[in-house]
Amino acid sequence: MSYCSAIEAMQSEEKKALHKNYHDNHYGFPIHDDNELFGRLILEINQAGLSWETILKKEISFRRAYSDFNIKKVAAYTDADKARLLADPGVIRNKLKVNAAIENAQTILALQKEFGSFEQWLEHHHPKTKEEWVKLFKKTFRFTGGEIVNEFLMSIGYLQGAHTENCPVHDKVMKQNPMWSKQY
């Protein structure tokens, strides 16, 4: 079942509203701000082993805890910051995921130096198959398995599949020219 139709099948109105906001306004839409791209990567990494609903409920807390996803600030986090995150009930308190966020921020800073931005690094490697993207992400970043990479890239418009073609949001996404629609 697609995410588009799964939302309509949700029983709880609160649950439906939470997912619908993400589905209708964020999922599959291109992101051009490096800090927001980094934030989406953090959220996708933290979803591993948990429900996406858990992450959506904690998004504001993640944003607050991780310095509004400011790459430079997160890259400079100290052991005290790690301890703060591991004690924060508003985020996922997993040492591997916390360390991955910090190390990935440091990696993105290096990519920004070399390519100008995280987005330009992504564009430089486009187009790739899902398997090629997974291999590249595993080589470049921490805690980025196949499902994390797939969802991250679908959620930012680099891989097709965020919305079914009969979903009304599909047309809104297409108007923003997602990268997957630009197969060179």
Image (cartoon, rainbow, N blue to C red):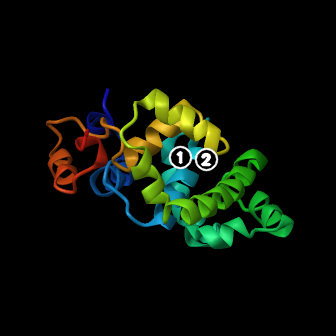
Question: Where residue 75 sits in the image (x, y, percent)?
Answer: 69, 66
Residue 117 placed where, x, y %?
49, 64
Residue at the spot of label 2: 46
Amino acid type, mark 1: Glu
Rendered residue at 58%/53% (across/down):
42
Q: Which amino acid lies under the numbered mark 2 shown in the image of this protein? A: Asn
Circle 1 residue? 44
Q: Of helix, strand and loop, which one carries label 2?
A: helix
Neighbor class of circle 2 (other Cα within 10 Å; few <14, some 14-19, many 20+) is many
Task: Measure the C-alpha gap from mark 2 to mark 1.
Answer: 5 Å
Answer left or right for 121 relative to 170.
right
- Quarter of the image where the C terminus is located: top left
**Residue 65: which quarter of the image?**
bottom right
- Asked whether disc 2 touches disc 1, contact meaning CB atoms under 8 Å apart, the reply is yes
Asked whether 149 or 82 is in front, the reply is 149
Of helix, strand and loop, which one carries label 1?
helix
